[in-house]
Image: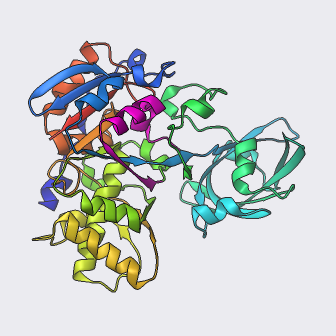
Amino acid sequence: MLSSLQRIRIEDYDYPLPEERIARYPLERRDQSQLLTLRGDRMEDHRFCELPSLLPDDTLLVFNDTRVIHARLFFQKETGATIEVFCLEPHGMAISEAFEQRQRCTWTCFIGNNKKWKGSPLSGRWKVEGGEFELTAERGEAIGNAWVVDFSWTGGMSFAEVIEAAGVIPLPPYMNRQAEASDSERYQTVYAHHDGSVAAPTAGLHFTPEVLDALKDRGIGTEYITLHVGAGTFKPVSTDTIGEHEMHVEPVRVTADNLRHLIAHQGKPLIAVGTTTVRTLESLYWFGVQLQHDPTLTHMHIRQWDPYTLDAEGIGYQMAYENILCWLEQREADQLDGATQLMIAPGYRYRVVNGLITNFHQPKSTLLLLVSALIGDRWREVYSHALGNGYRFLSYGDSCFFLQ
């Protein structure tokens, strides 16, 4: 199975996407976006605000509550050159720990206009309520196409406060515009909580407090887990086959209570809000499978092809999640911090989720492969319908709801 999956040609997941169909700005009201539904064989057009009435009884919706950080920092050199430092992830430190630092920390970063950075540290001053602070960046070793950067700052603020004040929200490159003040609020979900992403879990951008209240009124359950979205989510598949493409690593965080609630819901509809939530839930399953075979594992890291080589015979998601709970209890921990590179492509069998709420994705992307793994070749019909009926595409675009 693995060899045939790895031979999937990415050009078979291409479609024509005119530039004018890419949503560069969001709608004023989040929940007025269009919602294309595919439930069984029925495809229908709705507004997102109608979602609560479209969900099956006893549904549990699972959200990714990551928060997008102001990851793009711009430093002005005395020569007039502007250097961009794009914070990707902490280097040698957990995300939560890095954001709590109050004097210095180290990150892996992309550097824009790197040739103009001749080696001396960069610095800049920014105003905050009650004063100002100075931020200094010193470039270290190269790691692939990124760099290690040491940050230090004055003012006694946390690094989370520093980049919130000094940085800019990192819009996707396909928007082809600079971030504006309104993006700081609009490119976050209304339930964003844990700092760490450099891209929004965009399926969640359509939810409003009113929609969440309507879900509660209908008795729809909600659960919040965390996957911090990395810049690799925008990395195009540049190889001919997906077997040659390397998935990016992203950190995940779930609590023991999350796992208990998910276990208790087994047998009822479980719908993921966004592809990042899908990858988290399914990755947890495979970690539970790994623990079934080797309970002495010390950490969770699901590699992209693990699900296609592991023996999961007779292991349901309840058993897999219970394995993780037992593993946490043995370590007297109530939270799992892990990582995943999981690739979900046609041929993958979903083990946890029954449905997906998501946006319309880029041609020839791993996200489109994930959708195809859920609904098969009907993705072509769905995308053709959306293109023919005025739907808006990508991060600030419209949404779809697939239910098996």
User: Residue 30 in the image: x percent, y percent?
Assistant: 46, 25
Q: Is 380 situated above or below 60?
A: above
Magenta highlight on residue 215 = yes
Residue 298: quadrant of the picture: bottom left
Q: Residue at x 22, y 81 (%)?
A: 293
Residue 366 showing in the rendered view: no
Q: Nearer the viewer, residue 77 or 164?
A: 164
Q: Nearer the viewer, residue 104 or 186?
A: 186
Q: Is 286 on the left-hand or right-hand side of 301?
A: left
Q: Quadrant of the N terminus?
A: bottom left
Residue 170: quadrant of the picture: top right
Q: Is 237 situated above or below 205?
A: below
Residue 303: quadrant of the picture: bottom left
Q: Is 378 on the left-hand or right-hand side of 240?
A: left
Q: Residue at x 39, y 42 (%)?
A: 236
User: Residue 171 in the image: x percent, y percent?
Assistant: 55, 34
Q: Nearer the viewer, residue 93 or 43?
A: 43
Q: Is 242 on the left-hand or right-hand side of 190?
A: left
Q: Is 320 situated above or below 346?
A: below
Q: Residue at x 11, y 26 (%)?
A: 42
Q: Is 304 situated above or below 190?
A: below
Q: Quadrant of the C terminus?
A: top left
Which segment is the magenta one?
198-227
User: Residue 347 in the image: x percent, y percent?
Assistant: 14, 51
Q: Is 9 on the left-hand or right-hand side of 185?
A: left
Q: Residue at x 34, y 86 (%)?
A: 296
Magenta highlight on residue 359 = no
Q: Nearer the viewer, residue 233 or 315?
A: 315
User: Residue 83 in the image: x percent, y percent?
Assistant: 73, 42
The residue lying furthest to the right in this view is: 131
